[in-house]
Amino acid sequence: MERTTIPALATALALVASGLGFIPIAMGLFGFGEVLYNIDKSPTGTRIKHKISRIRPTRSDFRQVGGALARGTVLGSLLGLMPGGGSVVSSMSSYVADRG
């Protein structure tokens, strides 16, 4: 009886031939468990009683958030230009600056 070196179940998929990684499987299992947990703990009886009348912000909404919007834009743009920081550092720093 002669043995071949071709894997039986991975002839069409080269990705499967190298094996499955531990980290993607662990992430998938934790994610699946989180989905099941959230389905089980879904809120019941919590309803919004007010009807939504408008979606677009008004001028007063823009006046309220104008300062934070300008500060976040300037700080995020300047930090986003620096190499190595990326978008995470710039967005988190502008968030922290306007949080308090």
Image: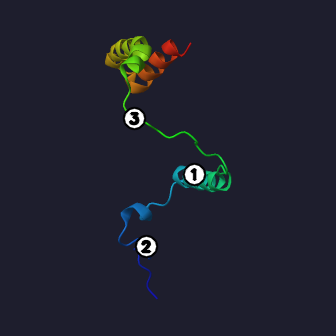
Q: Nearer the viewer, residue 78 or 6?
A: 78
The residue pinned by badge 3 equals 55
The secondary element bearing badge 1 is classed as helix
Query: Which coloring applies here?
Result: rainbow
Mark 3 is on which residue type? Ile
Residue located at (63% from left, 57% from top): 36
Say left or right for 39 vs 2.
Answer: right
Q: Quadrant of the C terminus?
A: top right
Mark 1 is on which residue type? Gly
Q: Nearer the viewer, residue 86 or 10?
A: 86
The secondary element bearing badge 3 is classed as loop
Q: Residue furthest bottom?
A: 1
Q: Are marks 3 and 2 in contact (CB under 8 Å)?
A: no
Please name which of the two marks, 1 or 2, marks the residue nearer to the observer: 1
Q: Are marks 1 and 2 in contact (CB under 8 Å)?
A: no
Q: Residues within 10 Å of mark 2 (few under 14, many from 20)?
A: few
Asked whether residue 72 is in view, the answer is no
Q: Residues within 10 Å of mark 3 (few under 14, many from 20)?
A: few
Residue 81 found in image quarter: top left
The residue pinned by badge 1 equals 31
Say left or right for 55 vs 24.
Answer: left
The residue pinned by badge 2 equals 7
Residue 57, position in %: x, y?
Answer: 38, 27
Q: Nearer the viewer, residue 29 or 72?
A: 72
What is the spatial separation of the Cα atoms under label 1 and label 2, in whole angstroms? 30 Å
Residue 22, position in %: x, y?
Answer: 56, 53
- Mark before the other along the chain sequence, 3 or 1: 1
What is the spatial separation of the Cα atoms under label 3 and label 2, in whole angstroms? 57 Å
Asked whether residue 16 is in view, the answer is yes
Residue located at (37% from left, 73% from top): 11
64 versus 51 height, above or below = above
Residue 60 found in image quarter: top left
